[in-house]
Amino acid sequence: MKSLLVSVTSLLLIVSAQAELKPSAETVLSRFLRYVKIDTQSKDDQPSVPSTAKQLEFALRLAAELKELGAQNVRVSEFGIVYSLVPGNLPENSQVPVIGFIAHMDTSPEVSGANVNPIVHRNYQGADIVLPADPTQVITVAKNPILKTMIDDDIITADGTTLLGSDDKAGCAAIMTLVDLFKQNPQIRRGTIAVAFTPDEEVGAGIEKFDIQGFGARFAYTVDGEALGEISNETWSARTATVTFKGKNTHPGTAKGIMINSIPAAADFISRFPKDMLPETTEGRIGFLHPYAGTLEVEQSSLKVLLRDFEPSGLDTKEALLRDMVKTTEQKYSDVKISIAVKDQYKNMKEVLKDYSQLIDYAMEAARRAGLTPTIKAIRGGTDGARLTFEGLPCPDIFTGGHNFHGKLEFNSRRGLEKTTETLMNLVQIFAEKAK
Ligand SMILES: [Zn+2]
C-alpha cells in the first residue's frame, strides 16, 4: 500500500510538471517492447553495410513510423541508415541550430537477439531478478546495486535466453517518442531536429557510411549510454600494435643449431605486460594495454595489442613501454627478429568537444529538469559519435537507462525510458530558450 502511495505521488508530480503536455500517441515503453522483439543483430566482418538484411527491415519500419508521425525528408539510404527532419516552429530568423539525435538499430553479435521475449517485472520491490526461461540467469542486487534505486519501477529484462537489446532500442524508442510528443504538442517551442537510426554500430561499420551533410544537423547526440543521468563527452584515444616474432623452422629431428623458435620469444614478451595495466585490473579513467589475439608458430608468431588511454600522453607512454618490452625480449632472444607496428584507431572526442562545452551543459540541464542528477562519464570504448565529432558533427552521448549491455542480464525500466525521453524533450527546449 505504501509503495502504491509513493508511485501515485510521483505520478502526480510528473503530471503537474508536464501539465501542458499531451501524452504521446504510443508510450515509450510500448514502443520499446515492440522494437526489442525485432531481431536486428549485426554480424562481424561482412563486406556490406548493413551486415545483416534484417536491419534493413527494421530501418523501413522506423522510416514508416517517422512518416506517420509527420517527420519530413524521411529516407533510408542504400546502407540502411534512416534519416529525417522534424521541422521546428520558431520564426525563420531565430538562431536555433538544428540538433540531431542518433540511435543505432543493431544489437550485439555476442549474444542471440532472435525471439527476444521482453518481460516487464511490475512494481519491483528489491529482490534478485531470476530470468524465467533460464533460472541460472539472475540479475542480483549484489552485482547490480543500481537496482536499489529502482524500487517501485517496472523493470524490463529478456527471459534469460537472449539479450534484451535495450542497447540501443531504448535510444530508438526514446527518439521516436520525442517525435511523437512533438506531433501531439505543436505548442512546444522548438527548433528543427534531425533524426537518424544507424546500422552496424556494434561491429563498427555503419557510421563510415553516415552522410553528415545530408543529415543536416549542426550538433548531435547519440542516445546510446547507460545509467540515467550519465552523459559522455569522452572516449578512449586508441591505437593497436602488432608485434611480430620471426624465427626459422626446420624438421625438428635435424634442428640442432638451425631452428630458431619464435614461440619462446613471444611468450617472454607476453610475460612482460605490467599486471596493473590490463583491462581486467583497471577501471575509471585508467588506461590499459590489452594483448587480445595472436598466433604461435615456430617460423613466425604474432601478437595483437590494444592501447587505450583518455590522454594522448598516456597513449604515448604505453606505446613507449611496448617498444621497451620489445627491446628487452630482443636482447634475451637475439636470433628472433622482432618488429612492432603501431596504428592510430580513434581519438578521444573531448579534443574537439572541449570547444563546445554548451552541448554538455545543456544536456546536464535537461537531465536536471527531468529530476535526475547528471554526471559526466568517460566512455571506456569508442562511439559512433566520436567518429562524427572528428568529421565535423560534434556529438556527445546521452544515457538510455539501460544496464548490462551485450548480455542476457541486460535490463532497463519504464522510468529509464521515460526519463530518457523527457531529457531529450527538455534538451530541445533548452536549445530554443538559449537562442532567444
Ligand atoms: Zn549501443
Image (cartoon, rainbow, N blue to C red):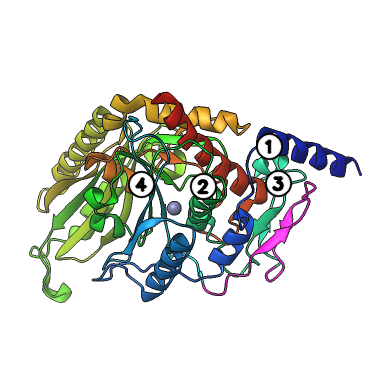
Figure quadrant of residue 349: top left
Disc 3 + disc 2, Cβ < 8 Å = no
Q: Nearer the viewer, mark 1 or mark 4?
A: 1
Q: Is residue 106 left or right of residue 78?
A: right
Question: The N terminus lies in which quarter of the figure?
Answer: top right
Q: Is residue 41 visible?
A: no
According to the image, label 4 marks what residue? Answer: 383
Figure quadrant of residue 119: bottom right
According to the image, label 2 marks what residue? Answer: 182
Q: Secondary structure at mark 1?
A: loop
- The verdict on residue 368 being magenta is no
Between 317 and 389, the one lying in front of the other is: 389
Q: Nearer the viewer, mark 3 or mark 1?
A: 1
Q: Classify mark 2 as within 8 Å of ligand 1 or not, answering yes or no.
A: no
Question: The C terminus lies in which quarter of the figure?
Answer: top left
Main secondary-structure element of the magenta-colored stretch: loop
According to the image, label 1 marks what residue? Answer: 19
Mark nearer the N terminus (1 vs 4) = 1
Magenta span: 114-134
Between 291 and 91, the one lying in front of the other is: 91
Q: Which mark is residue 207?
A: none
Question: Residue type at mark 4?
Answer: Thr
Residue at the spot 67% in from the left edge and 33% down from the top edge: 17
Between 27 and 313, the one lying in front of the other is: 27
Q: CA distance from mark 3 to mark 2?
A: 37 Å
Q: Secondary structure at mark 3?
A: loop
Q: Residue 232, image x and y in percent? A: 42, 36
